[in-house]
Image: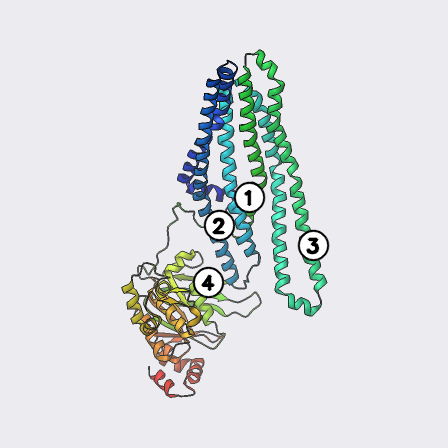
Amino acid sequence: MKPLTVRQVTWRALRARRRDLARLGGWSLVEAFPALLAGLLVARAVDDGFLAGRLVDGLAWLGVLAVAVLVGAAATGRTYRSLGAVVEPFRDEVAAQVVRGALRDATRAGGRPDSAAMTRLTHQMEIVRDTFAGLLMVTRGFLFSAGAALLGLLALAPVAAALAAAPLVAGLVVFLAALPAMVTHQRAYVRAGERLGQSAATALAGHRDVLACGAQARVASEVEQRVSAQAAAERTLARMAVIRSLSLGIGGWSPLVVLLVAAPWLVDRGMTAGAILGALIYVSTGLQPALHTLVQGLGGGGLRYAVTLENILRVYPHLPPSAGETPGPRPSTGPVGGLPAAEVRGLTFRYGPNARSVLRNFSLTLADGEHLAVVGPSGAGKSTLAALLAGLVPPQEGTVQLAGTPVADAAPAVLARLRVLLPQEAYVFTGTLADNLRYLRPDADDDTLEVALDALGARPLATRLGGLDAPVVPALLSAGERQLVAAVRAWLAPAPLVLLDEATCHLDPAREATVEAAFARRPGSLVVIAHRISSALRAGRVLVLDGDVPVEGTHEQLLDRSATYRALVGCWDEPMTPSRTVERQG
């Protein structure tokens, strides 16, 4: 997929919210009434009222202008409400992509947390949100206010409109010609700030090592260089304000000078004093403020928006579909037409370019409805295989498909519908028990939750907590209780494939047997990273990973074919306590 540009992302966000933009434009049109009528009404008040000796008429025309101003002020409040409907969803989309990208980079093979991601998510994200809103406001303000002023000026005196428009266009040309250089300097400023954040985060994270090695001066010097570079970039950016002032002088103040100088000539051509005053009002209260707002907005916030969003897209190039857009076709979320639940072909994975391969040219097919146990010594790649099947890490070679869908190309939402992974460290959040259980299936009613609690033997825990509506405090639960809550949550998930990565290691053997039996009865397929012999005995097929060639078969077959499996069974059987005896028989 080709990375999106700032222009494409902005256009897509605006196009997806056409209705909200239309509402914003409608209120902006009402807001522009004072700019459209100001000069005409002042000209009437002067020529037909005050200069004609009719004070009441003059005041009446000014009263009409006051009413127009009040209507415009009321519309201004509405424009800000409409603006939020456009800006906030866009901000949420970009923030979600930053979070997804940072998590993906931190959890991929060889990846590590990026300290600059926090800068992008906080400082840079707020810049994008605020400047996107400002960009919309100044652009629509210039279009409607300057357009209304020019229309009013044209209706009042076409010659005066031509005299005012010429320097206005010249000022815009000067500003637009300088925009590329402004973008370059703004980009340098953003990059300098990001490098400063990375340097400072690295220095703070390793401060003990810095002190131990006596490298305080060197590290402080490196951070100081980053500070100086950012300060220099900011000073250069500030100097670009001269160009903005020049364009404002040409486009904003020159029309006033031109009209004042040309006033005698305009009077000779028949313009009245009221018309000249009205023309000056159009320029001073309409064209000049609109141009000033546009230049300051584009030259300040507009540049920050373009460069900051460009920087985010450089790191996280693909944004999710905007709200209101129709996403592309989605893969099937379950086995279709006899497709296997999971299919692995030629898989090779290592944790670094020079590391030993954890899995090498590995292939596996998991049929729909099959129950597979994965065993092996510590470090053999069991959890790595679970992560690869779940699509959390990409292999260096080979492919992984779930129900015919390649996990490498599947969006996170699609993967969530295809599989559920339950790791050893169970996550339970503060909230009610029902909230925790519905996390992967929000539409589940209370009866469904009750059935799940009974199926996995979690009824005593739910009773002790006080029922579905009882608050859950994770710190007050044992490791086994947290695993049980997470297991019920995973059992309720609609995904057809369940991956249990030592997810029941803190449960007693009897409770573990109940949980695994419930998952085995559940429609779909089950992969269990086994840590007890009973888990392997309950599975229809067992896969042994031992750092060499993987071996698979039933429990009895592997006792004959795999020395590693026999060794594991021996370790599991010793010491042979009564509980172990019961476990072996189960």
| Residue 295 appears in the rendering | yes
Q: Residue at x 48, y 50 (%)?
A: 94
Crowd around label 2: few <14 · some 14–19 · many ≥20 (10 Å): many
- State how far apart marks 4 and 1 are (Cα): 32 Å
- Image quadrant for the C terminus? bottom left
Is disc 1 placed on a helix, strand or loop?
A: helix
Give the camera-side residue of 496 and 295. Answer: 295
Is disc 2 placed on a helix, strand or loop?
A: helix
Query: Could you tell me the amino acid type at mark 3?
Result: Gln
Identify residue for label 3. 225
Q: Residue at x 53, y 53 (%)?
A: 122
Identify residue for label 4. 392
Give the camera-side residue of 173 and 130. Answer: 130
Q: Is residue 187 left or right of residue 350?
A: right
Q: Which callout, 4 or 1, points at the residue further toward the start of the chain?
A: 1
Which quadrant holds residue 405? bottom left
Q: In the image, is residue 550 above or below residue 272?
A: below
- State how far apart marks 3 and 4 are (Cα): 38 Å
Q: Residue at x 41, y 80 (%)?
A: 561
- The tag on residue 94 is 2
Is disc 4 placed on a helix, strand or loop?
A: loop
Q: Position of residue 88 (x, y in %)?
A: 46, 47
Identify residue for label 1. 306
- State how far apart marks 1 and 2 are (Cα): 13 Å
- State how far apart marks 2 and 4 are (Cα): 21 Å
Q: Which callout, 3 or 2, points at the residue further toward the start of the chain?
A: 2
